[in-house]
Image: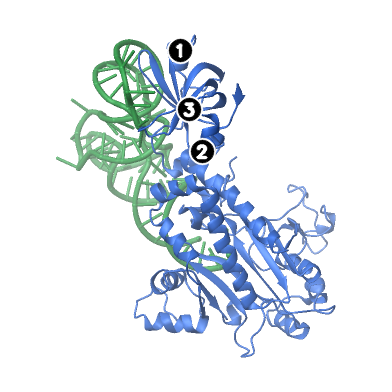
Amino acid sequence: MQTVEVKQLYRETGKYLNQDVRISGWVRTIRSSKAFGFIELNDGTFFKNLQVVFDEKLANFKEVEKLPISSSITVEGKLVETPGAKQPFEVHATNIIIEGMSNSDYPLQKKRHTFEYLRTIAHLRPRSNTFSAVFRVRSVAAFAIHKFFQERGFVYVNTPIITGSDCEGAGEMFRVTTLDLHNIPKKEDGSIDFSEDFFGREANLTVSGQLEAEIFALAYKKVYTFGPTFRAENSNTARHASEFWMIEPEMAFADLNDYMDTAEDMVKYIISYVLENAPEEMEFFNNFIDNTLFDRLNNVLNSEFARITYTEAIELLKKSGKEFQYPVEWGCDLQTEHERYLTEEIFKKPVFVTNYPKDIKAFYMRLNDDGKTVAAADLLVPGVGEIIGGSQREERYDVLVRRIEELGMRKEDYWWYLELRKYGETKHAGYGLGFERMIMYLTGMGNIRDVIPFPRTPGNCEF
RNA sequence: UCCACGGUAGCUCAAUGGUGGAGCAUUCGGCUGUUAACCGAAGGGUUGGAGGUUCGAGUCCUCUCCGUGGAGCCA
């Protein structure tokens, strides 16, 4: 008798039909009558369940019939077709071995639960349909991203998670320390003596691997990072987490248009790869989470992303005649309502907004010839908003120094970043993709807490 | 951090200031092809916490804790 996985049964049905098979999994539900019953078995390898039919010929029929949900079992029996039924085939059990009994107080019902409740049982929610689908899509999408970049010759760089540079400017950082918090060493002037700390200096969790990625881009030409990122911002929204994963490609001999071309190709690649490799999960999302999902994703695959400048975006918003809570004026950052209006109402597809005023963007973005704007571009998508932020980097030593000084930052802190501009500098560009936001976009899930296995948000670090 | 809303059985939700209920889940029983199976019965509650108003508070008031949605910040 061959041991098989449910995925094999669905993908290569003909190979196993009318054969004896052995399968191990967890009971999703049991419906039983006096002399026979049905088990929905899920073995984790496939989104769909396997229906197992059992009857009183089993020595342990009475025990099997009363198995609590989520008990683990091994089933032996013959795989047969079930024409006209909901499922294409089922296993007629000749033997059922009970591996591990579940308790009757198992908190996951067959009924729909709120996502909010499921978050409180993050150790069990991957066994539910929705989360089973979410985290498999997450895995498939992660692979698609690596595949996309590897096929194009990008080198995968692991930038540090603990960083001694507090100058990335991307947000509040989590401090990393081994100092005794009850007895903090102080210097004579009363300030904390970090020379006593583990690294002999202040250290934090990274908020971005970009500056380090630039180092590698100027050695390998094309690189990308894919790793965790930490922000200690007190953000309480469905789109922010304190710990999230980011993909940060960086390309030498590339400008803003090269970045946008790559990003557009990447988004399309991820979508088609996931549609092709997780079809059952994606169908589930389209049916039960967001029934505009397939239309939206196909629309993205079949359209050119719009590209407009910030200045044009401001004009469009002003001309729209719509009353915004925050008035639109050149120089102001685009608010969520503006971004959504642009991508959802005006373009109805992803849109790059380029060339933002320099005063609302980071120091490392390349100054345009007008002296007022920088070569930055954000990708806005319907439903989620900003999903990618990136720019051409300032490669001119003097201009970069001037920007650093203008913003009152300390030049010494950026010594190695500045040195890159001294030894064979070239134009280069890169961007950051929020992995969870991509998953939200791919699945239609509305909350970032429900697309990361163990979400960390302000005041929440369970599990 | 700001604004809004919410917290009642294991879960999802009802309950005009006047005896806290239902569906699902659980337990027991019935049922020969079920598909969130069906039918019958039972058990299950300090209404987030503290204080106050009232003859009487799940309901009104104050404070507090927690959560959700939106905003800001960003990816």
Residue A167 in picture, x, y percent from top left:
72, 68
* Residue placed furthest toward the bottom: A370
Q: Locate the C terminus of chain A by quadrant.
A: top right
Residue at 76% across / 70% down in the picture? A221
Q: Which residue is mark 1?
A: A61
Q: Locate the N terminus of chain A by quadrant.
A: top right
Q: Give me the chain that's green.
A: B
- SS class, disc 2: helix
Q: Colour of chain A?
A: blue
> Which picture quadrant has residue A85?
top left
Q: Decide which of A295, A80 is in the foreground and name it.
A: A80
Circles 3, 2 touching at the beta carbon (< 8 Å) = no
Return the disc, 3 or 2, that comes first in the chain's sequence. 3
Q: Could you tell me which chain the residue with mark 1 belongs to?
A: A
Q: Decide which of A174, A94 is in the foreground and name it.
A: A94
Q: Which residue is mark 3?
A: A106
